[in-house]
Image (cartoon, rainbow, N blue to C red):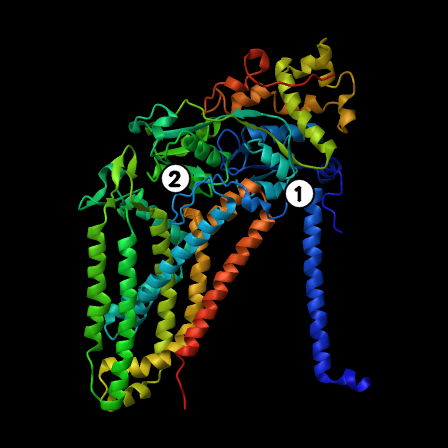
Amino acid sequence: MIVLHARAELDAIKARGHIECGVHLGLPGFSFANDKGEWTGLDVDYCKSLAAAVLGDSTKVKFTPTSVQQRWAVLQSGQVDLLSRNTTITFSRNATLGVNFQGINFYEGQTFVVRTKAKVAAVKDLADATICVAAGSTEEKMAADWFRERNLKVTIINFQKNDDAISAYDQGRCDAYTAGVGALAGQRIKFKDPAEHQILTEIISNDPQGPVTRWGDERWQLVVRWVLNAQIAAEALGVTSKNVDEMKAKSTNAEVRRLLGVDGKFGAMMGLSDDWAFNLIKQVGNYGESYERTVGMGSPLKLQRGANALWTKGGLLFTPPFQ
Amino acid sequence: MKAFLRDRKVRDIFWQVMATIALVAVVVFFVKNASDNMVKAGIASGFNFLWRDSGIEVPFNITGYKPSDTIWALLWTGIVNTLLVSAASVVLATVVGFTVGLMRLSHNWLLSTLAAVYIEFVRNIPLLFFVLFWYFGVLAALPTPKESFDFLGVIFLNRRGLSIPTPNDASGFHVALLASLVLIGVQIGLARWAKARQARTGQDFPVWSAGFVLCGALPLAFFVWAGVLTSWDLPVLRGFNYRGGFVLVPEFVALFMALSTYTAGFIAEVVRGGIQSVRQGQIDAARALGLTPGRVVRLVVNPQAMPVIIPPITSQYLNLIKNSSFGAAIAYPEIVAVFMGSALVATGQAIEIIAITLGIYLTIGLAVSVFMNWYNARHRLVTR
């Protein structure tokens, strides 16, 4: 019998010299390639952090753009080491696709974008409307369920690609287009005249998103999970790309010292070098820096932290202790 | 024993059996390997997902499908939509294809050049481009719902589609349809009787005029009568869209137009080739016998051209059916869009879903081939 992925993932990546990361086809703020082919975004930053932690160099990532339909096959077949692409964690995906979700790097919530002149204030005002959506997304089912539960009739048009759904909405085929708040903030830039459209403030779902791996290789899953935790912990502990050298040399905080590899030899326990977290913070930054640069106030999307703030600041982002 | 092994028949059978065993073994190996690996990777397999709730909305269906139905019902809706757009496109493609093919043969310079330009244009453009061109072209040309084109206040055309009224009670139409079928049967019988009488006595019978009354005027009268008897569900502008009646979505119209105009270009060339394969001497001989131009075509050209035309046209029909999968690009809910798109992502059971879709296209394709071969055999020139 031919056995898939017999080799340990971490060894394979080190031997290969780069990480294969599955990202979104093009979602400004999350994963977007500019005209020089350089990828930026929150999900992209996560993969860069992973490369910095595993290989010591955040540039050693090969990005594979995946569509909504391709993503699972690309991951299951071993073409990529992980998905970091704005994918919602759901029960049935976890139970039937042979994939594991390794934490949450973005709390997304579904809403709608409508034309300002349509005078829609709440989602229920969309009764009898036509809604464009990407086929196979959680949004497709969520929107159908939401209106059906309330006995409101809507027509839902499913496109195979996000971009086709967006341009059909823009052409007037639909009254609304539905996606997550963060995704919409980025996709709004693609409209012919972004000022003519408004994003509703009402949220109809919670869609936690984060990195996804295959079942099977626990050591690799450990690395994926704790690199995300390290990004969040660094923000909570006040370690940034600017002060990380100073913190490593002078900090007396026991958790900071363990995180940065001064004490405890935590890297070796995972099969990495002890400066894994130091490298990722130094080269990519902590979660907060990454957020502000890609989707927050330092970006065209201008998203508030909201649910994506640390648990100490009224948000939902949380990390177990480095102990 | 030696003689037995040297027997050519025995050897042939032996090698065929070996080849079959090898083929089956390879298939079994791959299926088993795939299923073992899927179990190991924690991926669900089997066909139970067909009976799960689909939860997927299909904006255009004539099967009465609802999102609370099963994935099996979703699959069936996709099949029906594929067949619907394919059947409609085959009809229009044939009509346009024959017309353009005949235009191409015309002695009129303008007609034949127009036909040649059309054929070359269509044959040298990728179909996906054609489909998107029709879709966004159709959308751009249509008004918003509030500014709809309005036909007599009952039919409305806008970017959300063509809203037409539907009868609340369709039983009158069923009766009218049945009556029309009976009349068509009568017409066929009449035509046979007229032909037999002409062969016997040489007397002509006005079959075409009778056909106009029996298959045209009377059925029309029945349908009008059925339409007057029932009440109608009229489309009304409510909020964003017209509600009520039946909506023919722009995705259907765009795909239908794209498929039929595209395939027509290929059919036109097949028709031209078929007609040109009939030698000029045959036509000259028919004229010399004093046959009218219409009869030259009907009795001499057609019977010799059709056997040449039908096999390649069958391939064009099969291409058209397969090309209907391009509907997925413009959200027309055919089998690839709803089953291989939405259902596949919802369930993740790629291997099963792709195998089922493959099987369905194969079944449709084989059925069309069998029918066209039967038609061709029936209309083959009887040579004595």
Residue A57 visible within the image: no
Q: In this view, does B143 lie to the left or right of B84?
A: left
Residue in front for this viewpoint, B148 or B49: B49
Task: Check the image and report above or below for A196 versus A254.
Answer: below
Residue B319, how many percent across, how many down? 45, 62
Q: Is residue A294 left or right of residue A256?
A: left
Residue in front for this viewpoint, B164 or B307: B164
Are both tags, 1 and 2, on one chain? Answer: yes
Residue at the spot 38% in from the left edge and 55% down from the top edge: B85
Residue A161, how many percent across, how many down? 47, 42
Q: Which mark is residue A78?
A: 1
Query: What amino acid is at disc 2?
Result: Ser
Residue at the spot 26% in from the left edge and 68% down from the top edge: B183
Q: Is residue B64 left or right of residue B346?
A: left
Q: Distance between the residues labelled 1 and 2?
A: 33 Å
Residue A22 visible within the image: yes
